[in-house]
Amino acid sequence: MKWPCGDDCLKRIARCIKDTIKRPTDLIARYGGEEFVVMLPHTTLKGATRLVKSILEAIARLNIPHVQSPISDRIPLAWASPVSCPRSTCDRDPNDQCGQGAVPGQG
């Protein structure tokens, strides 16, 4: 069964994320039904967090209604930033926060 409103919402969000990430090596992909993955190679946790905040702000500006939600009249947003990198990279940069795990946040 098709859900045209849901499909439109996901397309708008995907376009918004795509317009927010700038580097040609960054990748956005749909994961599961309503989730997206943004892969940011060669990005520190600090840089990823800054970009995710920009993405969440851009999506919030879309102001997409969610009329059937009991908790909000707008689409809900959440994120996690799992970070990993080759051990040799982490060894070279003591300020790098590789391997710190998931950092939860809300938009």
Image (cartoon, rainbow, N blue to C red):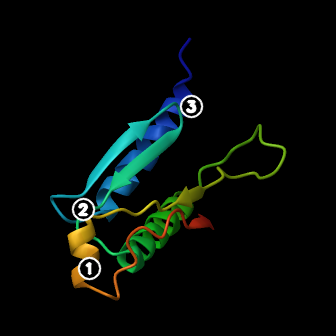
Residue 98, percent from left and from top? 37, 71
Side of 85 where 25 appears, left or right: left
CA separation, marks 1 and 3? 48 Å
Res 42 quadrant in image: bottom left
The disc at residue 41 is 2
Residue 23, percent from left and from top? 19, 65
Asked whether the beta carbons under mark 1 and mark 2 sit within 8 Å of each other, the answer is: no
N-term-proximal mark, 1 vs 3 = 3
User: Residue at 22% across / 73% down in the picture?
Assistant: 89
User: Residue at 53% across / 16% down in the picture?
Assistant: 2
CA separation, marks 3 and 2? 33 Å
Amino acid under label 1?
A: Asp
Residue 73, percent from left and from top? 75, 51
Dot 3: few (<14), some (14–19), or many (≥20) neighbours within 10 Å? few
Amino acid under label 2?
A: Pro
Residue projecting furthest to the top = 1
Looking at the rendered structure, the secondary structure element under dot 2 is: loop
The disc at residue 91 is 1
Res 21 quadrant in image: bottom left
N-term-proximal mark, 1 vs 2 = 2
Residue 26, percent from left and from top? 24, 58
Side of 37 where 6 appears, left or right: right
Task: Look at mark 3 in the image and give the residue it sits on.
Answer: 5
